[in-house]
Amino acid sequence: MNEPFAGAVEKPVPEIWYGIPHGYVEVDLDPPVEQIEEMVQQVLALPDGLRMQVEPVVQFYAGFVTAINEQDARACLLGMHLDEYDEPATSVITFSTVPAHGISAKAIIAGTVGSAADEVDGGARPLELPAGLAYFSEEKRHVPAPGRPAEGDGPLMGDIWQGTVAVTGSGASEIVLIQLVTSAVEMAEDFRNILLGVAHTLSFTDPALSGNEADAGAREPEPDSVVAAVRNVFG
């Protein structure tokens, strides 16, 4: 992990804490207006050639943050690693909460796992996490890809792998969703381990209150644990 725990998400309860895997950085989903204005001014002040290279990056960031916020994400981690060909393999981890609308969140998760178990190829399986009852599911999807198609062509399409962990919230009235999405479908096993590792670090209690915050950062995980796998996936 890059650091033992990220700060609490400053949005309505439940507050959550989580480990940040190697190769990931937190994305500011609510950047100050002044920061955006300063960024725009810096881009406009660049020489023409360099500005043409930087503008798409700034536009991508703005579009990315907008898209994530439209999904009511409470936190977002952006990761970049190298695949077996030393090409960039990017992924996004998001944290969000879903209200159970008066129904026990534990009952919803237990029912989902039970239904999946009755299917031949059940897509969900139960997880025992320190934070509570959970399930994990995964799928490969064919979706529109970023970029503009040539005039007259249909939308660009691409494959993604998406993994989801659903955990009961601290008050048992919310479900916390942790999702990882990547276009590097051939590395699904590696990203599955990352997602499960993050899920095992999820906490509804501030680690600082336990008095063991320093130990949490210094303590090495068991060699065969999922958290250790997160550290070792990309070397």
Image: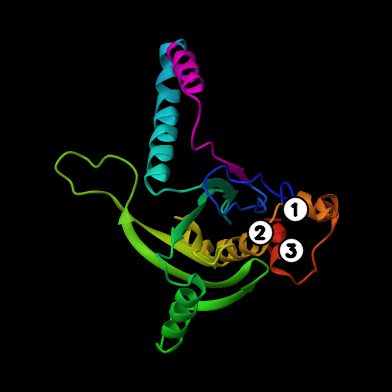
Give the amino acid at mark 2.
Answer: Ser
- Against 120, residue 5 (above or below) is above
Cα distance in 3D space between marks 3 and 1 = 19 Å
Percent coordinates x, y for residue 131 in the rendering: 64, 66
The residue depicted at 43 percent of the width and 38 percent of the height is: 65
Name the outermost residue toward the front. 102
Which residue corresponds to mark 1?
207
User: From the image, which quarter does the C terminus lie in?
Assistant: bottom right
Left or right of 65? Residue 215 is right
Q: Which mark is residue 203?
A: 2
Disc 1 to disc 2: CB gap under 8 Å: yes
Give the amino acid at mark 1.
Answer: Pro
Q: Nearer the viewer, mark 3 or mark 1?
A: 1
Q: Hey, which quadrant is residue 53 in on the image?
A: top left
The residue depicted at 55 percent of the width and 52 percent of the height is: 13
- Secondary structure at numbered mark 2: loop
Q: Which residues are magenta?
A: 24-44
Name the outermost residue toward the left. 152
Q: Which mark is residue 40?
A: none
Crowding near the residue tagged with mark 1, few <14, some 14–19, many ≥20 C-alpha atoms within 10 Å:
some
Disc 3 to disc 1: CB gap under 8 Å: no
- Secondary structure at numbered mark 3: helix
Q: Which mark is residue 228?
A: 3
If you read the primary sequence from the N terminus, does the residue marked by circle 3 or circle 1 appear first?
A: 1
Cα distance in 3D space between marks 3 and 2 = 18 Å
Give the amino acid at mark 3.
Answer: Ala
Left or right of 4? Residue 159 is left
- Report if residue 72 lies within the magenta region: no
Percent coordinates x, y for residue 90 in the rendering: 51, 49
If you read the primary sequence from the N terminus, does the residue marked by circle 3 or circle 2 appear first?
A: 2
